[in-house]
Amino acid sequence: MIRRVSNIYCSRGLIVLAVLFLTTSCRKDPVVEEFIDEPVIEEEEETLKTPVLPEEPYDYEARVYPDYFLEDPLLNLLNTLGGSNQVTNNGATVGRVMFYDTQLSFNNTVSCASCHHQELGFSDNRVLSLGFEGELSERHSMAILNIDFQRRFFWDTRANSIESQVLMPIEHPLEMGMDLGSLVYRMQRIDYYPSLFEAAFGDTAITITRIGLGLGQFLKAIRSYESKYDAGLANDFADFTPLEEEGRALFFSGVHSCVNCHTTVNFGGVSSHVNGLNAGGEGDPGVGGITEDPEDMGRFKSVTLRNIELTAPYMHDGRFETLEDVLSFYSTDIQSHPFLDDRLTTDNSIGGPPEILDITPAEKAAYIAFLKTLTDWNLVENVIYSNPFPE
């Protein structure tokens, strides 16, 4: 039986620091984050779930991007495939367990997967997600996929790497509410983690750095490239319906500027823009809240359109329930903003008058039909990304 570790913490002063120093200094990659307060352990007769894993880890390494991803000029500049935290089968396995483990939250109630559901393209169908105490998140949960071709993360692009990004929700006071140092202490006492960390990293040491690396590997392994559109690239779109083909032609024509922000074969996730959601930049400052630059107020990351059929509601605040709502906004409701993206203005200048795109009902239907061809059903049904904990 595994006993749950209490969330009551107290300091033991210099004695504890000395003990912690001796125990952590022997590790191969000691980090200062390991110096933590010793928790008081409460004995609770409660059996925790244990992950059910295959005898041999799933082959995450075999999921390799097609050549057209690697040959896309912009994606080739952005990709981190040659980085230090390469996806390994064992690394992604421990990351998968952590991604679904509610014990990474303060009161053992939510996990990363609570806000990023596989069947929803690793997004959430709530406008705002529920945190560990039932409070709402500050923004709509973004979809997770193909992050090898992204350099900055979150709607406001505040994280520079996926390894730092994955730690932020864990310690966020509304989301998972867990002190990272205390999380290390807890995980060291959960029986399945030492062996998983040893398989992934060579020894049983559990550190904050390794938690980030493992979660990062699992997220990097979530690769989406098996949609109807991807098949069309190989067969010249022979299986597209006339409506899907009409939508494809519209999208890449640039007549309504969609392809200008949702660029590359990943269809976005590269840059951030002011798209005129709020007049004058009122409301959530987005990137501007991080940089404090007036030009960034109201600027948000343009997410990938892959699996967009599954990731409603839309925008950083989840204000649009359907794809038709999104298209209606871009058709007639773009708001004035001093730094409105120049691709959405009548004179092609930053901050110019908003353009009325007048997307017709027939064009909307064609766009939606095309966007649905970007759904990767293998991704949302593939067991290698599924919850390893029994229901």
Image: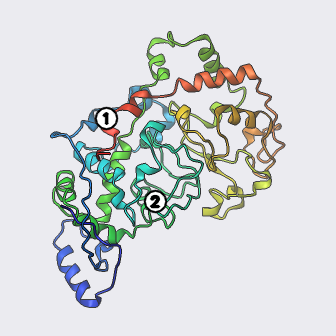
Height in image: 304 above or below 29? above
Height in image: 66 above or below 161? above
- Give coordinates of residue 100: x percent, y percent: 35, 50
Disc 2 marks a residue whose amino acid type is: Pro
Q: In terms of image quadrants, where is residue 35? A: bottom left
Front residue of 334/141: it is 141
Height in image: 299 above or below 76? below
Please identify the quadrant where the C terminus is shown.
top left
Residue 267 visible here: no
- Give coordinates of residue 281: x percent, y percent: 75, 55
Q: In terms of image quadrants, where is residue 87? A: top left
Front residue of 295/121: it is 121
- Give coordinates of residue 111: x percent, y percent: 40, 54
Which residue is depicted at the point 19% across and 60% down? 191
The mark found on residue 383 in the picture is 1
Please identify the quadrant where the N terminus is shown.
bottom left
Which residue is depicted at the point 26% across and 50% down? 94
Disc 1 marks a residue whose amino acid type is: Val
Name the element at disc 1: helix
Which residue is depicted at the point 62% across and 57% down? 287
Q: Is residue 305 left or right of residue 327?
A: left
- Give coordinates of residue 270: x percent, y percent: 54, 43
The mark found on residue 169 in the picture is 2
Mark 2 vs 1, N-terminal side? 2
Instruction: Look at discs 2 and 1 and give the one toward the viewer.
Output: 1
Q: Residues within 10 Å of mark 2 (few under 14, many from 20)?
A: some
